[in-house]
Amino acid sequence: MTEPSDRHDAPRYLEQAVQLAIRNVAEGGGPFGALVVTPDGRVHEGVNRVTRDNDPTAHAEVVAIRKAATACSNFDLTGAVLYTSCEPCPLCLSAALWARIDRVYYAADRHGAAAAGFDDAVFYDYFNGTRQELLPVAHHGIPTSEAPFDAWRATADRTEY
Amino acid sequence: MTEPSDRHDAPRYLEQAVQLAIRNVAEGGGPFGALVVTPDGRVHEGVNRVTRDNDPTAHAEVVAIRKAATACSNFDLTGAVLYTSCEPCPLCLSAALWARIDRVYYAADRHGAAAAGFDDAVFYDYFNGTRQELLPVAHHGIPTSEAPFDAWRATADRTEY
């Protein structure tokens, strides 16, 4: 595999993401910033808006991904690159996976986030299976459990993703 | 630990989530529905809107969590329970973790979702470390990497989450 060309852009875009993060703190938000660069070269910015919007999912990366998808009128961001001021937490990585982002670059890591009081590292442990008590998840089958999937398969003009 | 009281509500709320999912397919959306029940007893509904809103993060659970947080004017949903028609994918579980949801119940599982063509199980493998090629993630430290966290720590009136 050859080195991806976006690697050369990483320092510049990461600096831009860090500056967004610093500015967001001054504006009362969390210390995180991110950019999604779509294949057309457009740059879609996001900052953490959890506390200001009362939205626990409004992480910088999620905000940038949602903006990019809106701007592209497409839920599929294949070919896009995500640059973020800090290592993406499991929420943001999952959002990038679903958005079919090609590649992620980050500046600070989960340990820097933990030192600032954020739970990113703990939530990675949840997915590693070592902190399951954080959120008990119970399977509770009912007779209609599979009915939505049956309806989906029976829909000829469904939009897959 | 005693059995949680919300366990008795599970079949009724799961049936409601499944019916939302079925209706969502009829309306052109994905086969997923979810409810967040907040401690005040209010029920906040969500359906999958990925393809209709061009939002790769608009999973039923995320939509329900965002609605509940807006309705409660609080990014912290401690004491809330999430009921969902299908086992939450890593995106939705992460959203529930950040929202401090107490507990999750689901009807269908990730294998049912996979049989219907959805990548939930594959993305769990990503977090298990067995499908890292799905999304390469590179650390690329820059001189200002920690500056947002320094700014955060220097902000006396910060809102933590």
Image (cartoon, coloured by chain):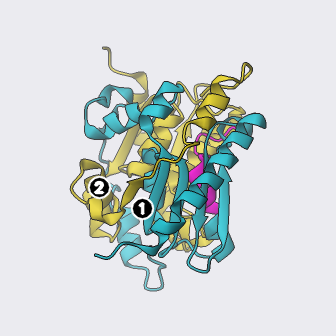
Chain colours: A cyan, B yellow
Dot 1 lies on which element? Answer: helix
Q: Residue at x 46, y 29 (%)?
A: A114
| Dot label at residue A97 | 1
User: For the residue carrying disc 2, how many other residues have a C-alpha within 10 Å: few (<14), some (14-19), or many (20+)?
Assistant: some
Residues marked 1 and 2, same chain: no
Circle 1: residue type = Leu
On what subunit does the disc labeled 1 rest? A
User: For the residue carrying disc 1, how many other residues have a C-alpha within 10 Å: few (<14), some (14-19), or many (20+)?
Assistant: many
Which of B97/A21 is in front? A21
Label 1 close to label 2 by CB (< 8 Å)? yes
Dot 2 lies on which element? Answer: helix
The Cα atoms of the two marked residues, 1 and 2, are separated by 9 Å
> Would residue B135 appear left or right of B62 to someone viewing this image?
left
Circle 2: residue type = Tyr
Find out whether residue A57 is within the magenta segment: yes
Task: Please give the residue where the numbered disc 2 appears in the rendered image.
Answer: B126
Q: How far across and down, in percent of the image, does residue A110 sit?
A: 43, 37
Please state, as top left, top right, bottom left or bottom right, where the C terminus of chain A lies in the image.
bottom left
